[in-house]
Amino acid sequence: KSQNDLAGYAPPLIAKVGGAEQLFCYTVEGLVSLNPKDGALHWRFPISTPFGRHVTTPIGYQGLVIVSSVEEGLMATETQISNNKIVHKRAWTSKPNAINFSSPIRIGGYLYGLGPQKNLICVDLATGRQQWSKTGYIFTSADKAHAAFIAMNNKVLALTDTGELVLFEANPNKFVELGRVQVCGKTWSNPAYSNGVLYLRDGLTKPGHLYGIRLTDAQ
């Protein structure tokens, strides 16, 4: 047991970031770095929001850990070893790219996710600068908008909250759609992909179903 934080909704991440393997927990109180072997606290980055709705899975990239809050914005914390201690500092914050409760993904040095204006976004992880934004895929109200993302090598597969699959290039220079198809009803599902089959469920507003959808040419 370590710390007394209230749990958020985000899953933890174990990753080697800034030269040291760390356990990152995005709790109601903020982002916490622990020693994964014994739970000892390395550092904490306080993030205080009205409802403590911290949902996005932390992303590790080089010396950065990235999380988001719809109130505070998309945030990167830099962590490194200094004088035999693991330390941290704020690297950048981008409120225009604030992500609510839809976890983004990383491909190379770029983040792909769902922005605050129901817009698909690509963000440079080194700087927090938005590369592009694309609307017209999410039709739920902004406070309830959701999409789930899966990296498919050099492509991104997104499942929208209205049950549409959208495949687009993992291209930081421009948005390029490769295909889209309706596969289920309303959903906040985070699908799983294995051996060419995508597993997901719907039923956000009524009893739903579990689906196994075989994908072709996704990779």
Image (spheres, grey):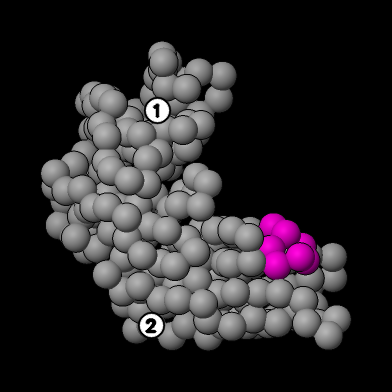
Q: Is residue 198 above or below residue 25?
A: above
Q: Picture quarter containing residue 65?
A: bottom right
Q: Which residue is mark 2?
A: 49
| Residue count near mark 1 (Cα–Cα under 10 Å), binned few <14, some 14–19, many ≥20 | few
Residue 61 is situated, as x and y percent measured from the top left of the image, at: 59, 58
Whether residue 165 is visible to the viewer of this picture, yes or no, is no
Residue drawn at (55%, 25%), measured in percent from left and top?
194
Q: Which residue is mark 1?
A: 210
Classify residue 213 as left or right of residue 60. Answer: left
Q: Picture quarter containing residue 81?
A: bottom right
Residue 206 is situated, as x and y percent measured from the top left of the image, at: 23, 39
Magenta-tinted stretch: 15-21
| Residue count near mark 2 (Cα–Cα under 10 Å), binned few <14, some 14–19, many ≥20 | some
Classify residue 23 as left or right of residue 48. Answer: right
- 56 vs 66, nearest the viewer: 66
Can you name the residue that lies furthest to the front here? 173
Residue drawn at (84%, 70%), measured in percent from left and top?
38
